[in-house]
Amino acid sequence: MTTILETINSPADLKKLSMPELKQLANELRTFIIDNVSKTGGHLSSSLGTVELAIAIHYVFDTPEDRLVWDVGHQAYAHKILTGRRDRMSTLRQYKGLSGFPKRSESPYDCFGTGHSSTSISAILGMAVAAKTLGKKGRSHIAVIGDGAMTAGMVFEALNCAGDMKDLRLLVILNDNDCSISPPVGALKNHFTQLMSGQFYAQARDIGKAIVRPFPKLFDLTKRAEEYSKGMVAPHSTLFEEFGMNYHGPIDGHDLEVLIPVLQNMKQLNGPLVLHVVTQKGHGYAPAVDNPTKYHGISPFDSSKGIVPSPHAKTYTEVFSDWLVDIARKDPGVIAITPAMKEGSGLVAFAKEFPNRFFDVAIAEQHAATFAAGLAAEGLKPVCTFYSTFSQRAFDQIVHDVAIQDLSVLFPLDRGGLVGADGATHHGSFDLSFLRCIPNLVIMAPSDENECRQMLYTGYKLDHPAIVRYPRGRGPGVPVDKEMHELPLGKARLVRTGNAPKGARVAMLAFGSMLAEAKAVAEKIDATVYDMRFVKPVDGDAIEEAAKNNDLLVTLEENVIIGGAGDACLEVLAAKGIPADVFQIGIPDRFIQQGDNLHLYQECGMDEESILNKIEERLKRIG
Ligand SMILES: Cc1ncc(C[n+]2csc(CCOP(=O)(O)OP(=O)(O)O)c2C)c(N)n1
Ligand SMILES: CC(=O)[C@@H](O)[C@H](O)COP(=O)(O)O
Ligand SMILES: [Mg+2]
């Protein structure tokens, strides 16, 4: 029997459905998403929470002519399915398959690419202003943003602009599921909780009924907006009204009978509008409702059993997590900071043992860095963790607040390099390039788990800012010493001395995770291998020695070649006036999409076989 879902090839098909059919469609979508994500992995909890919202928006608005931006974009699976991509959902997050996030090149319905949080209001505002400028009068502009994403500074920069522009067709839908990846934190959470409670909610509900009544639509909303502006309705004003936006809600984001007429009414209004929609993260799948954090972003699993933890070798994140607890037990000055990535960055154990020294500052990378600088200025030992990709947001703070003042902040940088299924928005491809140019910073890249622990300790002991940059997932499985020691600053480690004949003598200068490939290739061509350890200061003596004793130097890094660690080696050779044939392996100058890392390595020419072939070709040319 054909399901309703199978009849939906575009939002136009949705508009033909009755309310009971729309409700049936919501159920089918949920089942489809659970089944699909159980095979592909992905962001399950958030996408289950927005099923009705996606149906209602596409039912009411005329996408893609009306513009719709999903903040972060990890909740947009129902949107993808409803907009003609159902048949390709089995390729979600796979190599050459559908992206896990909205992507302009993938569909006209994805009018703006996302992945990093809190960009939606700025983007939709730009589009609304463009529509006005281009004379596209009837076009609506909708941003869907979560309560977690609302915490980032960029949102407030956008609201500050939007609230002052009264003649745009702009609707911000606050998708409030009372959850970021972790439970929500901060004063904004308290504000949203207040909006959901007591007298305010009761009044809002009554008004909600009024909004739902079919006639007179405009009158009700306009009147309500006036009442708000006169302070007549709410006992306290909402944040959005303080910013000059018309706030409506909260309403039940799983009730299509409410959502659809409210959106139909709001569609007719001009001005910056906010609709507060309450949803449940994981809605419709009990294990995800019980533990939305665990089911936030997941690997493939058996949906009949839920996620069953399996024993595994420690990841770099876990090595960091253990180190942090160990050092914090010794030093009461250690403070840990995360911008909303407690679980992913390995801070759960620390937060449990040292709740007063743990700060989840919400999605606020910029603030996290400067907050750490303030702590360091007073002599404490802040350990401020970032995913490499999200650290991009904190560049100026690392320069201006930390490095210029040479403050002793340790930045463990997780997910350095290719991260796999999240793709271009999330690969940690650039950090070595944009951080290496900052004076005072020490940058280390471990090639195994024990080195990671010792580098963290080395960074912690330094009186300068330090970065320890490690990849997503596991290392080679080296045992980790309990004791800690400082590594000699800026010194590489000679791992293997090659003995190839003249004309074929190769030295591999490997940074971080690429040591594994370097060693494997070296075995085949009898090459010399250095574990460079420090990207900054890079070991000039080792580079000089390698250049003098070999015919070809190969630098290897999991970072873009441009400006990366290999370039640091070239700079040394140029400064010392040493002629050398240097070949750089790293991420090429283009955005790498999603997929398993093996495919991505091959695509970048960073896998063992590609490296070997390239070296052999190069040696032929030299010879
Ligand atoms: C700049 C940035 N920092 C961190 C993240 C990681 N991240 C992805 S989703 C998320 C939580 C978002 O919460 P919310 O907007 O409420 O959406 P929900 O997951 O609840 O659906 C975080 C912290 C990100 N994508 N971008
Ligand atoms: C959407 C988002 O930004 C995060 O959920 C991210 O996908 C987490 O990545 P990890 O799976 O590497 O923790
Ligand atoms: Mg949320």
Image: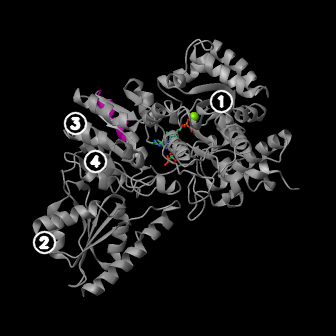
Using the image as rendered, state which of residue 476 and residue 508 is in the foreground: 508
Residue for badge 1: 278
Q: Earlier in the sequence, mark 3 or mark 4?
A: 3
SS category of the residue bearing label 2: loop
Q: Which span of residues is magenta-colored?
A: 323-332
Residue for badge 3: 407
Please state which of the two labelled residues, at mark 1 or mark 3, is closer to the viewer. Answer: 1
Please state which of the two labelled residues, at mark 4 or mark 2, is closer to the viewer. Answer: 2
Residue for badge 2: 578
Q: Quadrant of the N terminus?
A: bottom right
Res 445 visible: no
Depicted 83 relative to depicted 609: above or below: above
Q: Earlier in the sequence, mark 1 or mark 3?
A: 1
Q: Earlier in the sequence, mark 3 or mark 2?
A: 3
Using the image as rendered, state which of residue 293 and residue 131 is in the foreground: 131
- Please name the amino acid that badge 3 sits on: Leu
- Please name the amino acid that badge 1 sits on: Val
Circle 4 packing at 10 Å, graded few (<14), some (14-19), many (20+), is: many
Residue for badge 4: 455
Tag 4–tag 1 contact (CB < 8 Å): no
Q: From the viewer's perspective, is 575 left or right of 455?
A: left
On the image, the x and y values in percent for residue 498 come to 24, 75
SS category of the residue bearing label 3: loop
